[in-house]
Amino acid sequence: MSTWRPPERIRHAPAAGRWPTPAEAARARLFSPIALGPTRLAQRTWVPAMVPWRASSDGFVTPNVIEWYERFARGRPGAIVLEATGIRDVPSGPLLRIGDDRFIAGLRELVGRVRAASGGQTRLFIQLIDFLAIRRRPDPRRFLQEFLQITDRHRAACGAQSASDSEVRAWLSQRPHAELAEILTPRELEALEYGQRERVTDVNLPHIEELPRRLPALFADAARRARSAGFDGVELHYAHAYTMASFLSRLNTRSDGYGGGIEGRLRLALEVYRRVRTEVGADFAVGCRFLAEECIPGGTPLEDAAAFGCAFARAGMNFLSLSRGGKFDDAAQPKIGAAAYPYTGRSGYECMPSYYSDARGPFGRNLEPAAYIRRAIRAEGHATPLVVAGGIHNFEQAEEILADGTADVVGFARQALADPDWFIKVRSGRGAEVRLCLYTNYCEALDQRHREVTCELWDREHLDEPGSARSADGKRRLIAPQWTP
């Protein structure tokens, strides 16, 4: 499927800037400690959640998952957030799960191994996620012959109210697409053209209607398991294309008290947090990741996000992490047999902009919104730490973000993937040895195809290195080569 790109198509290159000496790094805000409630980071650097597609098909930790996080930990960032991990005990492919106690042992082993790899310096969080069903784009003939539920509307369209379902299906199968677009409802047409997708507003479906009654306990049980596994805290996933973000969205028009105005849209997010807090206690860090802007027509604007941030701070969250965009609503049409991918539309571009960009460029597009939200939180008297990420790759960028009050912690996602040793290199005065991310989104293209995520800057290097794990096709190494200080 094609991915949205700005029409300007200006090519931008990452800038190394000036790297600090060891003495300058020792005095830097970036390498100073900060408390996230009961948890203290040794430095204000953060590796956000990234899904590397290394879990087993039934959601368990694998050796490749452990090695992925060990590699980040050897660079000794302040914190690593484990990838989006499903809170339900349902099949979800090679994505980590935490919806049952049987997953705790593998996660506990991961925590121990990763903590040891950082010498105990890096704090570990796990991102807890819920998502609704989305189906692959069907073959049009099969959709009309098998999947479409025939109604009186379809019979009326073919002028035969007494026609059997099979007769109506046969008639619809002979219609050109333009005519089908007039006959089918908007949701039926979407299911044909993109694949069927559930929404939080589908309250006609009992399992969707009861989400507010079920999700708080599911998140709380997952958080309990995370604590048992030894994590330092949890990050509640309230961002992007998933269930909790959809409750916060302005597109949430539920009329049961969990939609509509800001108070209704916030209600479930706060109820989930309170239930989690009750389950894990005050001495375990709990925060969330949410969107500064949805970046879709009719979606949540910055002003709403500031209100959310203030509400989360008032409720007592220990940290707030900001992202942007990444929605299904404007995703590109997938190929037949593939599912829609929420990072192919404009909102997806805002989440992960590439080196071909508009005049603003791909670096720091979420900084101004983050500063706005942080000012709103501080104006209410809350000191809740704010994490920001998005195209941050050099020391001067990161230090300025902290110096001017844009955020309190700086996230490095693609840059940490390009060079997991960024943190230790810069702190030791060897920033000139950093491997800078090129922001080509090679990694994102692998994610879109559900292939093991790697970086083009190192995945073909030293393939003969003993013990180097390979991708399923054997052509790429799965973790960055070792760096010797």
Image (tube, rainbow, N blue to C red):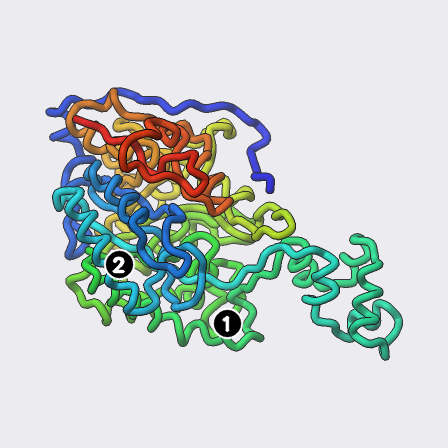
* Of residues 415 and 357, the one drawn nearer to the viewer in this rendering: 415
Number of numbered discs overlaid on the protein picture: 2
In this orientation, which residue lies closer to the viewer: 84 or 18? 84
Q: Residue furthest right?
A: 159
Above or below, 232 against 447 in this view is: below
Q: Which residue is mark 2?
A: 106
Question: Where residue 480 sits in the image (x, y, percent)?
Answer: 31, 33
- Which of the labelled discs sits on residue 208, or is there none? 1
SS at mark 2 in the image: helix
- Front label number (1 vs 2): 2
Q: 146 or 178, which lies in front?
A: 146
Q: Quadrant of residue 4?
A: top right
Q: Amino acid at mark 1?
A: Ile
* Residue drawn 22% across the image and 42% down it: 73
| Residue 343 in sight from this viewpoint | yes
Find residue 315 and report its image quarter: bottom left
Image position, residue 301 (x, y; %): 47, 50
Q: Quadrant of the N terminus?
A: top right
